[in-house]
Image (cartoon, helix red, strand yellow):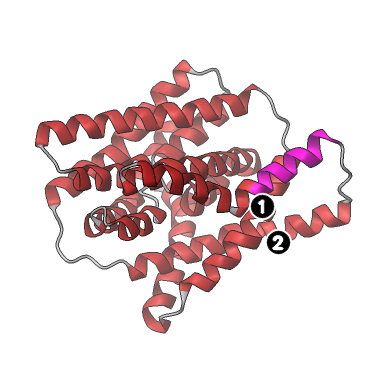
Amino acid sequence: MAIFIEVVLPVILIFLSGFLLQKFMRMEIKSISTVVLYIMLPCLVFETFYRAEFNQEYAMMIAFSILLLVCILLINKLAARVANYSTAVESGLILSTAFMNAGNYGTPIVLFAFGEQGFVYAVSFMVIQQIVMNFFGVYYAAKGAAGFRLAIQTVLKMPPTYAVILALIAKFTSIPVSNNVLSSIGLVGQAAIPVVMILLGMQLANITIKQLDWSKVTYASILRLVVSPFIAWGLTLLLPMNDLMASVLIIAAAMPSAATTTMYAVQFDAKPDLVSSITLITTLLSVITIPIALNILS
């Protein structure tokens, strides 16, 4: 109960503020998300990667992301074959189970639970996961060669991708970045997390559920909130990493479905009602499952 009050409840209250604001005010979310995507997140990502000490940990983080994705994809393909699901249903289930909300949900949870060092790991993983989601998420949503091309275009259009590139160039070519400039970048970057938390609440307020397909929602919820962190735990035993990084990655893997996948599902008609309902249900259930996971790790 203490972990729920100290770690999860503060995050939920921020989500709730965005949810209530959107329910009563019906604001235009795109403008806010654009500011976050094009200014705040790139600043946060730039500072994180510019200050980071690159070592084996980042390679392990990339390996972890790919292996976790492969495991969940295989589970979904097996389930789709056994249940004889259509390609659209399979794509919808992949979108809602393979990609977690490691950004506007995972990073604040990690910050409250594991402090600044854990937060650095969480931001780095968020960037890796965002690239993976933009590529494979769009690919499976579009279901074909057109999806592959669009996935590449989507990754290249993401400002955080260029923030990583610029940070690495500045870091490894010894291009000087003054302390005042870095402080300004850090100041804007610090605003990213609270704003995206509020934005998630607003996005959840816009999700509409026409009819729940409880069998698929239950399957997806168990896979996303229970099976995924267990797979992550197994991967952290196989891959060499420190205990803090392992804990951060396990918690990230226990996050609910990413809200971004709902947009992909709508754009490519990959069962958007199913994906949005799974996103909402897993987010609600995570209020219970995340404190349990944190208690186990502690």
Q: Position of residue 113 (x, y in %)?
A: 53, 44
Nearer to us in this view, 58 or 121: 58
Residue found 56% across the figure and 64% down from its top: 195
The amino acid at mark 1 is Leu
Residue found 48% across the figure and 47% down from its top: 106
What SS does tag 2 mark?
Answer: helix
Residue found 74% across the figure and 60% down from its top: 187
Which class describes the residues within 10 Å of circle 1: few (<14), some (14-19), or many (20+)?
A: many
Above-or-below relation of 238 to 214: above
Residue 140's disc is none
Q: Report how far apart the C-alphas of labels 2 and 1 lie in the structure.
A: 7 Å
Q: Position of residue 290 (x, y in %)?
A: 38, 44
Query: Mark 2 vs mark 1: which is more N-terminal?
Result: 1
Residue where numbered disc 2 is placed: 188
In this image, 259 relative to 219: left or right?
Answer: right
Asked if disc 2 and disc 1 are in contact, CB closer than 8 Å, the reply is: yes
Is 30 a magenta residue? no
What SS does tag 1 mark?
Answer: helix
The rendered magenta stretch, by its main secondary structure, is classed as helix
The residue at the far bottom in this view is: 25
Q: Which residues are magenta?
A: 162-173
Q: Position of residue 238 (x, y in %)?
A: 46, 16
Which class describes the residues within 10 Å of circle 2: few (<14), some (14-19), or many (20+)?
A: some
Q: Position of residue 223 (x, y in %)?
A: 27, 38
The amino acid at mark 2 is Val
In this image, 273 relative to 44: left or right?
Answer: left
Residue found 47% across the figure and 23% down from its top: 236
The image quadrant that residue 164 belongs to is top right
Residue where numbered disc 1 is placed: 44
In this orientation, does residue 279 appear? yes
